[in-house]
Amino acid sequence: MSQPISQPARHDGAPQLARCRAALFDLDGTLADTAPDLVAAVNKMRRDRGLERVPIEQLRPLASAGARGLIGGAFGLGPDDHDYASMREEFLANYEADLCIETTLFPGIAQLLDALDAHGIPWGIVTNKVGRLTMPLVEQLGLAARAGCVVSGDTTPHSKPHPAPLLHAAAALALPPEKIVYIGDDLRDVQAGFAAGMATVAAAYGYCGNDLPPAMWHAQHIVDSPLQLQHLLGALN
């Protein structure tokens, strides 16, 4: 299991949601339920080694951490272990081969995005998933032509929790960071949003990891469903 990442401090001067003019979303665990296909990829690795599959319920909370979280959960290995790099490539190859078999948008997300579009509110995606996986998945989910920007984990030299991907997205939307809200289901999402100077929302309906509960992330808002998120984003104009 990964170690908890240091928490951002609460910031009284953080941007107010009502002042925001655009929304950025994490992908895995926020817009899309990708856990079934991610878990299938790591369980194929176990099956190829003659090991029993790990139940999806056990690995699901780790899905937002991608290869690092799932390999750690399924094999007890981390990036510092000798075999991790090769196992990561094996995992990514498995996942790329069956990228969108059971993956779907979370219930209510399609309606949320429709509402943003109907009100002329731009939105985009900022994920730590590598580009070779992000773009095909976004296309298969029917979001590529609609998103104002799509920023992958390798679009900038740094991935979340570094603010660089979010600042890149803000530039793509031609808006200052303080006019944007970032929504994600991982502590790193809140950290990145805070560091970029954006308003932050924790998607507690997502995967959320096993380290700290969303209430301890110090996001400005927490939502338990996409419907709650849609109501919350009604403040955008």
Image (cartoon, rainbow, N blue to C red):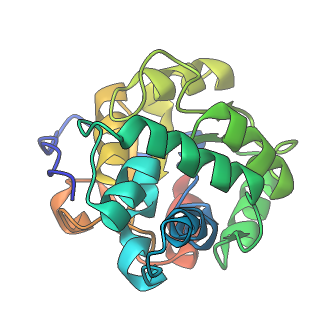
> Quick check: can you spot residue 204?
no
From the top left corner, tell me how far across and down residue 177 is, in percent: 46, 26
Q: Quadrant of the N terminus?
A: bottom left
From the top left corner, tell me how far across and down residue 44 is, in percent: 58, 67
Residue closest to the eye, 219 or 64: 64
**Residue displayed at 44% across by 75% down:** 51
Quarter occupied by residue 55: bottom left
**Residue displayed at 84% across by 48% down:** 139
Residue closest to the eye, 47 or 124: 47
Q: How many marks?
A: 0
Height in image: 88 above or below 196? below
Residue closest to the eye, 22 or 138: 138
**Residue displayed at 15% across by 61% down:** 216
Q: Is residue 118 left or right of residue 22?
A: right
From the top left corner, tell me how far across and down residue 186 is, in percent: 36, 55
Quarter occupied by residue 191: top left
Quarter occupied by residue 70: bottom left
From the top left corner, tell me how far across and down residue 185 is, in percent: 41, 59
Residue closest to the eye, 13 or 202: 202
